[in-house]
Image: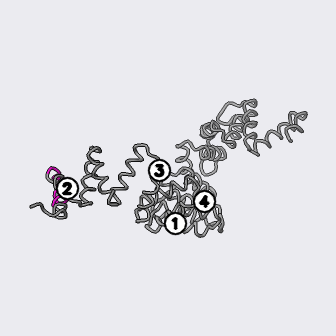
Amino acid sequence: MTAAPDILYRQAAALLEQSNTAQALPLLQQAAEQGYTEAAFVLGNHLLQNGHPEQAFPWLETASAQRHPKALFTLLQQREHNGIPTGQLLNDYAWLGEQGHLESQLILMRYHAQRNDPQSLYWAELAAARYAAPAYYHLARHHQRQGDVATAIEQYEKAAALGVTAACWQLGQIYFYGTGISPNHAQAKQYLEQAAQAGHIAAQTLLADLLAAQRKPEALEWYRRAADKEQAEAQAKLAQYALTGELSERDPFQAARYAKAAAEKDHPEALKIMGDLYRYGLGIKADNHIAQDYYHRAAALGSAAAAQKLISDAALYHPQQYEQIKT
């Protein structure tokens, strides 16, 4: 007499825990053939994970037909992997999402968000109820765009508490600049440090700006971390501080190195610093023609200081060009 399918399944599960697949798989198949849905899913999933998709799919299809959530989700993921667009699978994902399947809710949130479809908020709310960090972040971005900074902060903080670096970065900016609230540099420092420690380059530079404004030499270390990742703003700041001698000893050669790196990325203030270095022969052989070229490039990219240098030089040495440059 054949054992009941639930008994077969429990026996198979015990054998799988002992890594005895040779005896477990036949028992799973017997249970699945008797209509035990969980056995069909476990059998199909095991075959799929062990490189036997052709044998796996019939069992996953069997479990999926009984609306087994994990089986259906596994099939949907395989279909996407095989090139079927997410848009053709929305009904099944939506069914799973309504059943509380978190991964499906997040897939639907992202799909609709990419299309600026407000349905993304519906799925984000459902996922947020399951404490999903990406959902908190999505809701925070929405509320910030709507001007509801208080709610945005609340959602960002939930995401940040779950380790979302981008949420720490957003909070750092809000508190640093006082976006919709009063600036709070202590709070800004807390969140920027979290993002910076996680390797967020822009956060490293903004944290360095905050520390530099407080005349703290550790600002230079954060600038260096960002500069090592080729961030032009950090390279330009290091060039500036090396040239002026603030926060550390004056070093025109270091200033030239960092300014050149940022200038190659068309950073306007770095171009202006390169102009200064060539104009005065600091760490580089003086060459006024090259200096003027750098000033022109910097001014064209919006450097007011470079534009002022050009105007001053024209007034002193080229009065016939003064009015043209000034305008």
What range of the chain is rendered magenta? Answer: 11-22
Residue 180: horizontal and vertical position, in percent?
66, 66
Crowd around label 3: few <14 · some 14–19 · many ≥20 (10 Å): few
* Magenta stretch encompasses residue 15: yes
Determine the residue positioned at 47% across, 54% down: 198
Amino acid at dot 2: Leu
Q: Closer to us: mark 1 or mark 3?
A: 3
State the residue in front, 2 or 176: 2
The label on residue 88 is 3
User: In this figure, which residue is indicated by the disc labeled 4?
Assistant: 173
Amino acid at dot 1: Glu
Numbered disc 2: secondary structure: helix
Query: Cα distance, mark 1 to mark 2?
Result: 46 Å
State the residue in front, 9 or 285: 9
Above or below, 76 against 269 in this view is below
Above or below, 36 against 222 in this view is below
- First in sequence, mark 3 or 2: give its number: 2
- First in sequence, mark 1 or 3: give its number: 3
Corner quadrant of residue 301 = top right
The label on residue 157 is 1
* Magenta stretch encompasses residue 177: no
Amino acid at dot 3: Gln
Going by the image, does 209 lie left or right of 294?
left
Q: Closer to us: mark 1 or mark 2?
A: 2
The label on residue 28 is 2
Numbered disc 1: secondary structure: helix
